[in-house]
Image (tube, grey):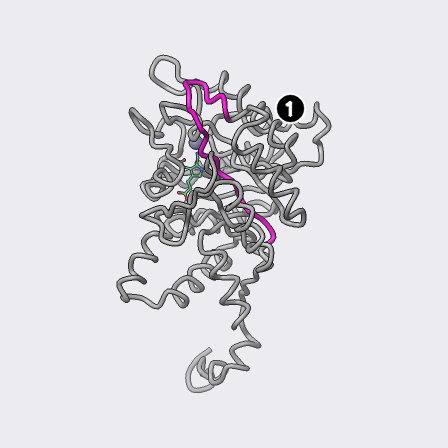
Amino acid sequence: MFFPQFRARRIRGNEVFRRMVRETTLSVNDLIYPMFSAFGSGIKKEISSMPGIYQQSIEHIVADAQEVYGLGIPAVLLFGIPETKDAVGSDAYCDTGIIQETIRAIKREVPGLVVITDVCMCEYTDHGHCGIIKDGDVDNDSTLELLAREALSHARAGADMVAPSDMMDGRVAAIREALDENGFDKIPIMSYAVKYASGYYGPFREAAESTPQFGDRRSYQMDPANRLEALREAASDIDEGADIIMVKPGLPYLDILRDLRNEYNLPLAVYNVSGEYSMIKAAAIQGWIDEERVVLETMLAFKRAGADIIITYHAKDVARWLKQG
Ligand code: PBG
Ligand code: ZN
């Protein structure tokens, strides 16, 4: 492959050639849209660090879900902001909790839309951690029981898929067992298999009102310096019965996404998290970058690195741009 026999520019010369040799594609089918359901009514409150993203009460969530469905996006990922929080996150596994009611409303009004739920305790605990606190740290094994109850109550309310994000050891197995024992053997688990302790979650914690009241999440989320550990985390979740594995955050961890793609043949998801969204939005609002171009390039980067599924706050915009393009 030497010049002048080889000229890389020959197949780059016009748009039809470029289309013919394009290696990676992006489709609306790849997208999942995250939503924040707030207790109450008449609430539609924009998250200041995430322009275009709202905390919404159920009637607004349902209208939004209708729009998402109309755009052809296959699924939403739900987070709840409950009326009250306590030490053991009771609302998380209450059959009339915020998420359970939201699932019922969406499945009633927009039955064709896949509803995935985030399974974790941090939105429901008054201390903001992802599990039960014992001796100043999150206790793994007692948290498993509550996560299993939470996932089961989501399934009972009609969730199509559950997505545990807590990072307790053994939670995929605990959830799988609870679902199977109760007749929900067909409900898939998308596990946040590889989830780093990341500064990029900052805006989300404003959105979900889930900032830890003491310490941080480094005793359960992964150290950003580690790469081999990602393979161990993914392997254990797959052994425990995960149907889809996820890497989170996205852009700073594309190498990890590629590692998992090379190592495993399960569907692979990536979470393009709140801080990644906020950075693009902020620059776009300043007029410093072309938002559509940068977002589509970012989505393509996830696909190129090996993702099958992209969870992103840009999903509605991406769906619109793909339609026009
Ligand atoms: C809950 C959870 C978090 C995110 C998804 N599920 C926050 C956290 O772990 O602190 C982050 C999503 C985002 O930043 O967009 N465990
Ligand atoms: Zn959590």
Seen from the viewer's position, the closer of residues 252 and 121 is 121
Query: Who's the residue at 32% across and 47% down the image?
Result: 48
Query: Who's the residue at 58% across and 23% down the image?
Result: 149
Location of residue 124 with respect to 61 vertically, above or below: above
Question: Residue 104: x and y, percent?
Answer: 62, 37
Q: Callout 1: few (<14), some (14-19), or many (20+) C-alpha neighbours within 10 Å?
A: many
Q: Which residue is mark 1?
A: 178
Location of residue 15 with respect to 321 vertically, above or below: below
Residue numbers of the magenta segment? 74-91
Q: Write down the quadrant of residue 108 in the picture.
A: top right
Question: Residue 80: x and y, percent?
Answer: 48, 35
Q: Amino acid at mark 1?
A: Ala
* Quadrant hosting ligand 1: top left
Question: Residue 211: x and y, percent?
Answer: 34, 32
Q: Residue furthest top?
A: 135
| Ligand 2 is within 8 Å of the C-beta of the residue at disc 1 | no
Location of residue 203 with respect to 66 vertically, above or below: above
Query: Who's the residue at 32% across and 29% down the image?
Result: 216
Q: Secondary structure at mark 1?
A: helix
Left or right of residue 226: residue 163: right
Question: Residue 97: x and y, percent?
Answer: 54, 28
41 in magenta: no
Seen from the viewer's position, the closer of residues 300 and 53 is 53
Q: Residue furthest bottom?
A: 4
**Count of numbered badges drawn on the protein:** 1
Q: Write down the quadrant of residue 221 in the picture.
A: top left
Q: Residue furthest front?
A: 42
